Image (tube, helix red, strand yellow):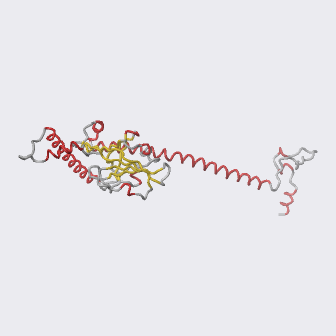
């Protein structure tokens, strides 16, 4: 062991390192310049690590903010894409299950809607025509007979409208997400498929009908909710609707036409504003203002007429 120590202590320059590192004989070994600017002091590695950590933290924060910004922009775009696809599928399903829906375009432009009310003069004529002729009453005029016949036909259409609505309610009741028809508002360019139900999943596909409210033809207020910013934002322009504008509900059994009577802003708990008043109405509701759920915008209209759609298949 002593020999080993001695041998290690007297290693030649060649043994101490590669031949190229040895100084030529007769020359002194160069001395390191400890004063050069690249000298590493004992405290410098710690300071360098500290600077690296600061830079790393800032870089991480910047990257995180970039990712958050991208996600913030991508979210509404993604939801719009999802709803666009779902709307296309719902429209195809609606027309596949109800072939008669293909003819609703012509029905919308037709003028032969059954009126919900008749003019006072026509009503008087119909009432007079309904009274049986006796020896003391004057014979009915041709106008009175025609008015009475028209009123009888209107009442029969109303009865058929109600029966069709009842049948349709039974067919879609308890089936959330089922496409039930279209909402068409010409003044704002809206033509969107609505679904049954107002669950989160339902409203991601389109405006949803409140199941507890009656269908058109059942004598009540048909209430629908929808998004204004995400998931296709079907009700984005709801605030552009004005009193007097037209709302059409295109259903598999009928086209119901309404005239807007008011546009109001309410709080979420003011549900009495969409209460049932015993007459044919529609209420479209959405969050207000956009990007906020603080209030609700409600567009309401009264039904002015309807047109039954002949069933096929």
Residues 286 and 42: in front is: 286
Q: Residue at x 20, y 49 (%)?
A: 159
Relative image position of residue 260 (x, y in whole percent):
36, 45
> Which residue in the rendered view is the most extreme toward the bottom?
1
The answer to which image quadrant residue 200 occupies is: bottom left
Q: Residue at x 88, y 45 (%)?
A: 23
Q: Is residue 83 left or right of residue 130?
A: right
Quadrant location, the C terminus: top left
Residue 41 horizontal/vertical position (percent): 83, 54
Count of picture labels: 0
Q: Position of residue 214 (x, y in %)?
A: 30, 54
- 83, 134: nearer the viewer: 134
* In-image side of 234 versus 107 (left or right): right
Which x, y percent locates residue 259? 34, 44
Kindly give the residue lying farthest to the right in the view shown.
Answer: 26
Tell me what residue is drawn at x 14 percent, y 41 percent: 145
Pick the residue in front: 258 or 90: 258
Q: Name the quarter where the N terminus is drawn.
A: bottom right
Q: Determine the image quadrant of residue 270.
A: bottom left
Q: Is residue 295 left or right of residue 17?
A: left
Q: Residue furthest front?
A: 136
């Amino acid at each position: 062991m002593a020999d080993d120590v001695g041998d290690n202590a007297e290693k030649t320059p060649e043994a101490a390192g590669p031949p190229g590192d040895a100084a030529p004989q007769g020359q002194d070994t160069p001395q390191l310049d400890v004063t050069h600017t690249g000298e590493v002091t004992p405290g410098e590695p710690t300071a360098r690590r500290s600077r690296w950590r600061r830079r790393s933290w800032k870089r991480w924060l910047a990257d995180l903010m970039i990712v958050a910004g991208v996600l913030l922009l991508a979210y509404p775009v993604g939801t719009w894409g999802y709803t666009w696809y779902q709307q296309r599928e719902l429209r195809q399903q609606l027309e596949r299950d109800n072939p008669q829906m293909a003819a609703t375009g012509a029905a919308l432009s037709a003028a032969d809607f059954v009126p919900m009310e008749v003019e006072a003069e026509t009503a008087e004529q119909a009432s007079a025509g309904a009274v049986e002729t006796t020896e003391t009453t004057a014979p009915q005029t041709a106008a009175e007979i025609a008015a009475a016949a028209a009123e009888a036909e209107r009442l029969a259409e109303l009865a058929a409208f109600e029966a069709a609505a009842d049948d349709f309610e039974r067919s879609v009741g308890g089936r959330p997400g089922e496409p039930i028809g279209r909402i068409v508002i010409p003044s704002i360019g809206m033509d969107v498929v609505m679904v049954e139900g107002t669950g989160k999943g339902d409203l991601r596909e389109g405006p949803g009908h409140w199941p507890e409210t009656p269908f058109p033809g059942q004598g009540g207020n048909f209430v629908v909710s929808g998004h204004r910013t995400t998931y296709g934002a079907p009700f984005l322009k709801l605030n552009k609707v004005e009193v007097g504008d037209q709302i059409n509900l295109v259903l598999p059994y009928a086209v119901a036409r309404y005239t807007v009577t008011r546009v109001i802003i309410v709080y979420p708990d003011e549900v009495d504003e969409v209460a049932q008043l015993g007459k044919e109405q529609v209420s479209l509701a959405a969050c207000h203002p956009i990007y906020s759920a603080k209030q609700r915008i409600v567009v309401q209209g009264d039904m002015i007429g309807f047109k039954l759609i002949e069933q096929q298949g």
